[in-house]
């Protein structure tokens, strides 16, 4: 088994000690930074699939995101070249201050090849507009955990479209109560209850 295969396996297994040793060994052996990152991202993709299959749960996803960041630190932090799929802007819409789901999505997108701009919680429409103009993301994520925040989510989408900032971009929504009828109500492009499915939807859009 090669070093990179060991990196994929140890991350997939959430075996921190072995993973850190393998990353250090890869660095010492002169492996390219992006090759190591690609192996880590494959491990994260495996974890996302296991989460979708209910083999892993929220706690494992959060741990995996923390481990990925630590590996990134071993490699010298995040490089612009890591974000091969461009920028992803995400925030919990105004009227809602829940952030656990949003934080997990942000972490997984970051470890899957996106540069993530996290706007936080209770985010007003203008903040989304400003971020779209400043960072030019290809994918925008709106999160909420309360059905009472659905009108706010619709307001954000309406204002993005009114400003013409939806062109060439994908607007994804997510959160516990979100379903297809919510997509139709707010005017988004899609939703996913699974973070891995959301990543796959975003990558498919960016690479189409």
Image (tube, helix red, strand yellow):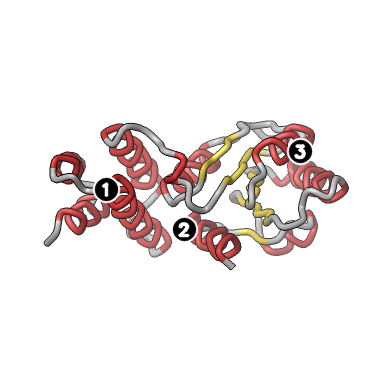
Describe the element under mark 2 as helix, strand or loop: helix
Measuring 80% from the left and 46% from the top, which residue is drawn there? 160
Earlier along the polypeptide chain: callout 2 or callout 1?
1
The residue that disc 2 covers is 196
Q: Outermost residue toward the bottom?
A: 208
* Local secondary structure at mark 1: loop
Q: Nearer the viewer, residue 179 or 115?
A: 115
Question: Is residue 129 rendered to the left or right of residue 206?
Answer: right
> Where is residue 6 shown, x and y percent of the image?
17, 55
Residue 185 left/right relative to 5: right
Give the numbered dot on residue 129: 3
Q: CA distance from mark 3 to mark 2?
A: 26 Å
Q: Residues within 10 Å of mark 1 (few under 14, many from 20)?
A: few
> Sequence-wise, which precedes: disc 3 or disc 2?
3
Q: Residues within 10 Å of mark 3 (few under 14, many from 20)?
A: some
Q: Which residue in the protein does label 1 denote?
A: 32
Disc 3, SS = helix
Residue 133 on image: x %, y %:
73, 39
- Residue in the foreground of this view, choosing between 53 and 108: 108
> What is the quadrant of the N terminus in the image?
bottom left
Q: Please rate how many residues cluster around mark 2, counting C-alpha atoms within 10 Å: few if below 14, some from 14 to 19, many from 20.
A: many
The spot of residue 149 in percent (x, y) is: 74, 42
């Amino acid at each position: 088994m090669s070093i990179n295969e060991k990196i994929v396996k140890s991350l997939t297994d959430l075996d921190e000690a072995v993973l850190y040793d393998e990353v250090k060994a890869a660095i010492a052996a002169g492996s390219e930074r992006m090759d190591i990152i690609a192996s880590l991202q494959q491990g994260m993709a495996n974890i996302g699939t296991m989460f979708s299959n209910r083999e892993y749960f929220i706690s494992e996803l959060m741990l995996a995101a923390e481990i990925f960041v630590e590996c990134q630190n071993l490699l010298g932090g995040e490089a612009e070249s890591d974000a091969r799929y461009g920028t992803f802007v995400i925030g919990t819409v105004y009227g809602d201050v829940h952030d656990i789901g949003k934080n997990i999505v942000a972490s997984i997108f970051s470890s899957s090849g996106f540069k993530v701009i996290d706007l936080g919680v209770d985010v007003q429409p203008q903040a989304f507009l400003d971020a779209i103009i400043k960072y030019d993301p290809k994918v925008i994520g709106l999160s909420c955990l309360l059905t009472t925040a659905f009108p706010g989510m619709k307001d954000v989408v309406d204002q993005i479209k009114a400003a013409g900032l939806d062109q060439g971009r994908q607007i994804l929504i997510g959160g516990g109560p979100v379903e297809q009828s919510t997509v139709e109500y707010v005017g988004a492009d899609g939703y996913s209850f699974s973070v891995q499915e959301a990543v796959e939807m975003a990558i498919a859009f960016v690479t189409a």
